Image (cartoon, rainbow, N blue to C red):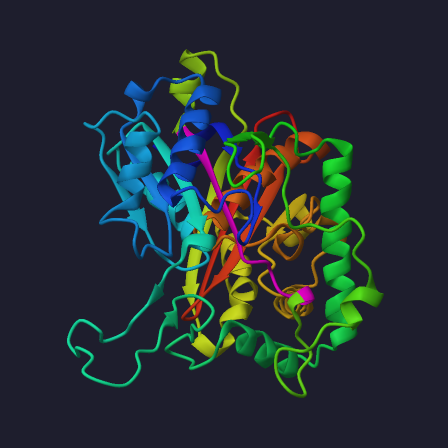
Amino acid sequence: MKLEDIVMVGATRLPIGRFGGSLRDFPVYDLGAMVIAEALKRSGLGADSVDEVFVAHNRQSGNGPNPGRTAAVRGGIPTSVPAHTINMACPAGLRATVEAAQAMVLGECETAVVCGMESMSTIPHILPNARWKPLRSGNLVVQDEFFGMVEPLSGLSAMGLAEHTAAKYDISREEQELFALESHHKAARAWGEGWYDDEVMSVPIEAAQGEPARIFERDECFRADASLEKMAKLKVASEGGTVTAATASGVTDGAGAFVLTTRARAVAAGIEPLCSLVAYTQIGLDPADMLEGPALAIPQVLEKAGLSLDEIDLIEVNEAFASQILANERELCWDRARLNVHGGAIALGHPTGFTGVRLMVSLSYALRTHGGTHGLIALCGGGGLGVALIIRNENGG
């Protein structure tokens, strides 16, 4: 089987919850279970047709030995179907897609579920070395597993990597804030126009702590009232720097899933696919320059597909930071009007294990909404990684 014979037949995602927001009390595997069950429902294929489940999830501490397996079974996948969890930092969701496609091309499965999930609200605090150094006197220091993180290979924090990129490309704070403002406005317009209505499923939230039961159905982080004046009041992340919280992706919770199957099975079942796969690639680079990953991966995947960037109708590049997007834009000179047309991670948030799947889901629906034939997805990743993938619209582009 060829890659282009693999089609997406059911896709959905949760509304993205802010840090400590509407999704904070859900275990991450329950977020995954919700979208797996809904993606299967939308696909028109039964759970008994699934051969394997591929789940992207990065922040696994405290979630058991294989959170992807837990999500799959709780999502209605039979216990006889294998599932595993994939961690590749930010591109994990796209890597899960690639692994599913590779298994299908090799003939190891005919139908696969791909899921991405992350609950950044439930990332734990830890006591390093407490197991082997019992406290006789003195203090134990609690370490934040997320906000205290430094990328080991570069020795830089996430904000430090963004500052490194901004300095390397001489990107000003004002340029970054203009881009961030654009991301918020795109997201607000997409919700206002109803462009997310088919993509996003709703989540029932039980009554708790004096709050009534409700339905969570809209991304929590984007700001329709975002302004340059408000952004200008924020402090920079480091002295003399240019990066602020406004020009960084939000810390959030979310999950999404889709079903991949063969074109032959979709035709036999009378199912109209959303999209098909065209080409993919992955690269490594200097860890300090990790935010430039898309600039290296995108030319490779275009060459594999036999396409030029001008032939790509819509582009989804994860907005880890505004400086990252602007640096890659300078290298590739893409048409900004085609980029992240429904808003990106600066507005919506970046639940890391989920984001690659979100881009797949969002791009497939955006091509259906706006028309066009080809869409491109790319992400950078911690440690110096880049992954890119091209899809083809199967809804008449």
Magenta segment boundaries in residue numbering: 246-260
Query: In this image, 47 relative to 340: left or right?
Result: left
Q: Quadrant of the C terminus?
A: top right
Specify whether residue 105 is in view.
no
Residue placed at 62% from the left, 66% from the top?
328
* Camera-side residue of 155 and 127: 127
Q: Is residue 77 left or right of residue 310?
A: left
Q: Is residue 239 left or right of residue 172?
A: left
Q: Position of residue 225 (x, y in %)?
A: 81, 52
Q: Which secondary structure dominates the residues rendered in magenta?
A: strand
Residue 155 in the magenta stretch? The answer is no
- x then y, percent, for residue 238: 61, 83
277 versus 18 height, above or below: above
Residue at the location (77% across, 59% down)? 181
Task: Return the residue nearer the eye: 308 or 149.
Answer: 149
Q: Quadrant of residue 80?
A: top left
> Can residue 345 be seen in this snapshot?
yes
Total labels: the figure holds 0
Instruction: Residue 5: give x, y in percent of width and height.
Output: 42, 30
Front in this rendered view, residue 193 or 133 = 133
The image quadrant that residue 265 belongs to is top left
* Residue 292, position as x, y percentages in the image: 55, 69
**338 is higher (above) or lower (below) than 44:** below
Query: Quarter of the image holding residue 43?
Result: top left
Quarter that holds the N terminus: top left
Residue at 55% over, 60% down = 299
Determine the residue located farthest toward the right in the rendered image. 229
Which residue is pictured at 64% across the width and 64% down the height? 325
